[in-house]
Image: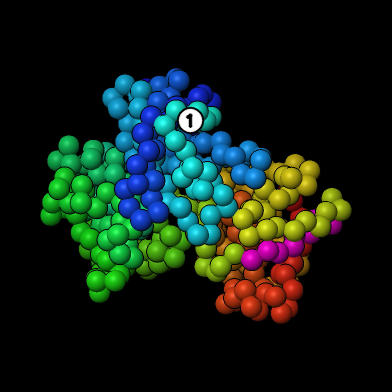
Amino acid sequence: MAASNIEVWQLGTVVEVEKIATDVQRVVLEPSLPRKAEPGSHIDVMVRIDGTEDRRSYSIVESSEDGTRLAISVLKAPLSRGGSVFIHSLLPGDELEITQPLQNFPLRVGAGRYILLAGGIGITAMINMARVLKNIRADYTFVYAGRSRAVMAYLEELQEVHGENLVVHVDDEGTPLDVHSLVDSATEDTELYMCGPIRLMDAVRRTWTARGLSYPNLRYETFGNSGWHDPEEFIVKVPRLGLEVPVGKGRSMLEALEDAGADMMFDCRKGECGLCEVRVLKLEGTIDHRDVFYSARQKNATEKMACCVSRAVTSPTGLASEASASGPAVVTIEVS
């Protein structure tokens, strides 16, 4: 059965743990209710952070045919809100709550040509897609960009499997990705799938749109902790509910409001669906839009924000020194 968006929670038992790149941990799980994961699918995992539980989403790197084993690979990010630290603490024999495979990023078979673009740990969402395209002998180019080879998980394995179809860009080797050249290589029948940092995906989206290419042919998955500025603590006010809530560096606005008792609407928690949208009534600072839901015009208007991922910072630079000098940013909102 293909992955769907129907949540079925189950136990996952850790059977293997392996460091596969700098700060990247591969974890193999045995689900209690196995189901094969289709390309582009993910699982939600209940993680424990400072004694409380929260959910995080992780792409499924691979799955056995019968679904009895599945693997995720997680970067221990320096700006993590705690989920990656928890995953890196897992040991064989540990049990945790996971969903069955969920699908928000399906691969459509039948396009004339494909470009798969992975930035950093975004490679985890693309490996299964590339495997399928190779098996069906599709016309595909697999682009993998990273800061250095040491942090690029699965790189050697992918080079062996995909050969000339894999194009590697490494910043510290002087071969960074040129987004304009990449998009210029796309034909009218090309579908581009991407996963990576918000800056990379925003640049691709803008260039793709400027080229006049078909927007439905551009497909992506996001990371909610990838932003334009370093995270700062800020204050969110909801006058109608009488709330004034601090949002720490390691928490999202949505999580902080939920903890304060607000009844919030949400779905993806990754800045893709727009269901968690809040209206900005007043802003003391700058919004760090971390979503891929709003257009550039909507973001510049600063009238709305996706509270599951977007934040407020004290200045356009987002420097901690400026934050301490001027006090935290404050955003006053109205919730649905």
- Along the viewing direction, whichever of 232 and 114 lies nearer the viewer: 232
Q: Residues within 10 Å of mark 1 (few under 14, many from 20)?
A: few
Q: Quadrant of residue 37?
A: top left
The residue singled out by tag 1 in the image is 94
Q: Is residue 31 left or right of residue 170?
A: right
The image shows residue 195 at horizontal and vertical percentages of 38, 53
Classify mark 1: helix, strand or loop.
loop
Q: Does the image show residue 133?
A: yes
Per the image, is 239 magenta?
A: yes
Indicate the position of residue 216 as horizontal and vertical percent values.
38, 50
Q: Quadrant of residue 268?
A: top right
Residue at image location 42% in from the left, 32% down from the top = 92
Please state if 92 lies on the left or on the right of 320 as rendered.
left
Q: Could you tell me which residue is drawn at 46 percent across and 52 percent down?
A: 76
User: With respect to residue 106, does 329 lie above or below?
Assistant: below
Residue stretch in magenta:
232-240
Image-based side of 43 in relation to 22, left or right: right
* Image x and y of residue 135, in percent: 17, 37
Q: Residue at x 24, y 71 (%)?
A: 173
Is 230 drawn above or below residue 99 in the view shown? below
